[in-house]
Amino acid sequence: MHLTIYSAENAPNGSRAILEGIAADLGLVPNMAGTAAGSPALLSAFDGLRRAVGAGRLDPIAREVAGLAVGVAVDNHYGVAFHSTVLDRLGVDDAQIERMRAAQPPSNPKLAAVYDLARRIVLDRGKVDDDAISRTTVAGVSAPEILEIVAECTFAGLVGALDNLAGRVELDTFLAPRAWS
């Protein structure tokens, strides 16, 4: 399906102010947000989830690990490039990023638990068994952190659905070095 990438200048009326807010926050309108702008309702949901996940207390690296796990699981090229880029900027070793992009958990036990849980949440549509939850909590992930991982999975799943529906949203220039094939 061909989906237009809108800017704040040419977006539908209900999307313009939201895109302006995203640009104020990030310094640009990412192509994924510009694509969602074709529907003010979708863009509002996208931006609300983006803001809620960003305001959470989950460690930023753990949040990006969860997002990358979902991106790989749902074949979301935009999300994989985005989360890989952010993990790199957060100082995560390139070898660990490449492991995750290859559907392998990182070597850090807590981050591996986050990665595995996020994959289970999306692949099993939330029907995560008690053993998976137990492995996650034993690794040091608290119940509130698990709930924030659910929020990240929801946001990453939305991005993945839109990316796949569009047949791949064009990567922004800053994401191109982390394109995923």
Image (cartoon, rainbow, N blue to C red):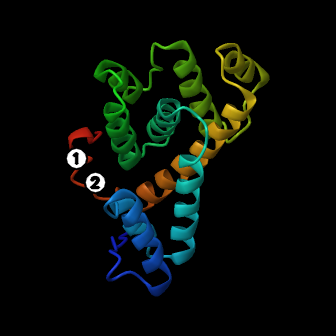
Q: Quadrant of the N terminus?
A: bottom left
Q: Residues within 10 Å of mark 1 (few under 14, many from 20)?
A: some
Q: Position of residue 112 (x, y in %)?
A: 53, 19
For this rendering, which residue is in front, 132 or 141? 141
Residue that carries the numbered disc 2 in the rendered image: 171
Q: Residues within 10 Å of mark 2 (few under 14, many from 20)?
A: some
Q: How many marks?
A: 2
Question: How far apart are the two marked residues, 1 and 2, measured between alpha carbons?
Answer: 6 Å
* Residue at left offset 45%, top offset 13%: 107
Residue that carries the numbered disc 1 in the rendered image: 176
**Residue type pointed to by label 2:** Leu
* Residue at left offset 48%, top offset 20%: 105
Residue 115 drawn above or below residue 160: above
Residue 51 drawn above or below residue 85: below
Residue 78 visible: yes
* Residue at left offset 33%, top offset 62%: 31
Are circles 1 and 2 on residues that touch, CB within 8 Å? yes
